[in-house]
Structure formats: C-alpha cells, structure tokens
Amino acid sequence: MRILLLTTHLNIGGIGTYSVTLAKALKEKGHEVFVASSGGVLVSELAAAGISHIRVSIRTKSEFSPKVFRAIFAISRISGKLDIDIIHAQTRITQVVGFFVSRLCGIAFVTTCHGFFRRNLGRMAFPAWGNRVIAISEAVYEDLVQNFRVKKDRVSLIYNGIDVKRFLKDFSEEERDSLKDHFGIRKDHSVIGTIARFTPDKGHDVLLYALYDILKEKANVQLVFVGDGKERAHIVDISERLGLSENVIFIKPQLNTVNVLSVIDVFMFTPRRKEGLGIAPLEALASGKPVVATRVGGISSIIEDGVNGFLVEPSRPGLLVEPAIRLLKDKGLYQKMSQAGREIVIEKFSVNGMVERVESVYKEVRGEIK
C-alpha cells in the first residue's frame, strides 16, 4: 500500500514519536510510506530510514485557519500525484485536512486519537473521525464512544508500540557513572526522573513538592527533568524557591532516550488530568525502570498498581513520596517490578504488534472504499 501519514509537526513528543515509529515499521513491512507535516527535529529520523517527508504549512490550532484550507488543496494534489491508498491523520488539524482530502480524492481515511477532545464548535462542524478511528487506550476508546457517540464498529483499540529492543540493554555501573557525569548527575545519588514537555498538565511542580518531602527521608536523591516547553522557567523558579536547585537537573529533549533512562532509577509520570497513554512510561518500563504515576486517562493500561509500578491520585505530591522511597530502598521489590515492567511492554506494547493491527485496519478500510 501507498500510505500518507499526516501530522501537524514532527517535534519530540508522543505524536511525533508515534508517527516516525509507525512510518518506519510500515516501511519495513514493505509499504511505500510518506509523511506530511510542517517539519521538526524528527524529520532527520525519517530521512535516515529512507522515508520521504513532505513539508506542508499546517502548524495551527484552529480548524478554521486559512492554513487548513490551503493544506487541503496541497495534500489533495500530493495524494493524486503519489497515488496514495491510505491517509492516516494523527492530530485534530490533520483530521480535518485528511477528511476533506479523502472526500475530494476518494481515498480511504484513518485517524488516530492520541488523547481527549473537547466538545466545541469545530468538532461539531467537522467531526472528521475517518472511515476508522484508532484509540490508543481503553480510556480514549470509551471517550470516543460515550462522549462523541462514535460507533463502536468504527473504533479500533490499538495500543501505542515502541521498539522494545532498543531499551533492553543493561548498562554496567561504569557506563551509568559515565552517563551521570555527562548529564551532570552525582554518582552517589539515587535518581528519580521524568520525560515530558513542560506544560501545566504534566505536573512538574507536583514532582518538585514530592522531592522536597522525599529528601527529608533520603538525602541523596536527585530529580531529573527531560524536556522543554513554556513552563520550564516557572519550574526552575519553584525549584529555587524550595531550595532544591542542587537536587534538580534539567536536561534538554533527547532524540534517543535510552541513555538518559539508564541513569534514572525510578521513573515518575504525573499528569494532572487525562493522558491518552504515554510513550515515555513505556520506554521507561522497557528499560527496566519501575514507574510511579498518577491514575489518569490511559495510564492504567500500562501500569498495574503494585506489579510494575505504583498508581496514585493526581496533584497530590505527598502520595508520591512513599512509593518512590520504597523502590529506592527495597532492592527485591525493585527487581520484581523491573522484570514485570519489561514483560508487559514486550507482551502488549511492541511496535510489531502495533503495526500489524494498524495494517489490518488499513486493509479493512481499503476494502470498504472499493
């Protein structure tokens, strides 16, 4: 099949990573894959895999932006020229673009919902769900069916998948010490950390307040934040006001998260509200790191409380302290959860399983269009 993946941008983050991972996996399955977006740092990953990227100016948050209408005609021309069989949209804006392109060109149209939508004028005017909708977790599936009345037979539950093999390396103590030096982390300190864009919903401040209490029980702990975003300066300010500057490390976004995950002992994932699924905790589990997370959205599809990590209620830093301390002190519990985490990712969240299910959806919708 000739497949066009649409996404607003290809910057580091869940949707960008998903788009690149899916594109590579589809290519390895023998499909001809193209990706259209407004660009981003992950374009180089596509180029290295021999996948064509088509730059289209669709970086906007409004379905009614002139960019959307221009993109519809641009993608329509591209789809005809490339003889595209499937259009697969990853973001709200590209759902709208893909919907009209599919109607204009008679092409099968699939969307993936990576999170939760608001019931607003744009969504009411242009539902744009596609011939089939992929939901990345049970929580997203239920939201589509119950709140947006999408018919169950149009929604396919397909978990995000990652290239598990990349994260199975067990680093030696010397390698981890070297990487700690590289990232500015003290060798004699335990490390808790997260990988997430700095936005209010991700709960970086909650982790700072939790660290403040963790240090009362275990002094040699550092907190690592990996990412960037508008809220970064605010989080830096809070860490300074709490007197935590020596215990908080800020690391820029990483194209390859394997190395930074190797120096984190316990992965923390603390969104305040709904989270579709979360690629970062999947990568952490595959790396053998137990996860302490908030019980929101699709996170419970990944973390089984007391088995491969701990789940707590959101926006309550005090609840993060005890599980983090337990994992840092109890080596037996740590090893048990580390093994369980790797097993669940291999079983449920491999890229091979994901691409096979997505490929099946493509075949179904192509048959329906024909």
Image (cartoon, rainbow, N blue to C red):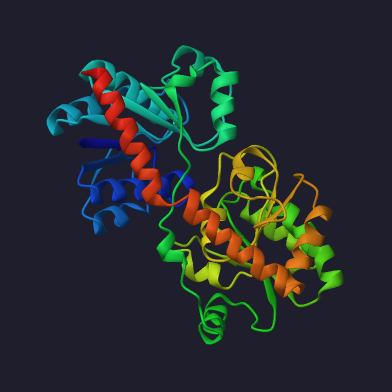
Q: In this rendering, is residue 64 above or below 158?
A: above
Q: Position of residue 53 (x, y in %)?
A: 25, 45
On the rendered structure, is 55 left or right of 210? Answer: left
Tell me which residue sits at (60%, 51%) in the image: 198
- Asked which quadrant contains residue 301, the reply is top right
- Asked which quadrant contains residue 226, the reply is bottom right
Tell me which residue sits at (73%, 71%) in the image: 328
Placement of the C terminus among the 4 image quadrants: top left
Q: 106 or 35: which is nearer to us?
A: 106
Q: 64 or 99: which is nearer to us?
A: 99
Instruction: Report the residue that reaches farthest toward the bottom.
Output: 174
Task: Confirm whether residue 169 shows in the render.
Answer: yes
- Asked which quadrant contains residue 246, the reply is bottom right
Tell me which residue sits at (86%, 70%) in the image: 216
Q: Position of residue 348 (x, y in %)?
A: 49, 48
Q: In this rendering, is residue 85 above or below 46?
A: above
Q: Position of residue 114 (x, y in %)?
A: 50, 37
On the rendered structure, is 5 left or right of 320? Answer: left
Q: In this rendering, is residue 124 above or below 355?
A: above
Q: Position of residue 311 (x, y in %)?
A: 72, 50
Task: Confirm whether residue 255 shows in the render.
Answer: no
Q: 149 or 269: which is nearer to us?
A: 149
Tell me which residue sits at (24%, 16%) in the image: 104
Q: 156 or 238: which is nearer to us?
A: 156
Instruction: Report the residue that reaches farthest toward the top.
Output: 125
Q: How many marks?
A: 0
Placement of the N terminus among the 4 image quadrants: top left
On the rendered structure, is 124 left or right of 36? Answer: right
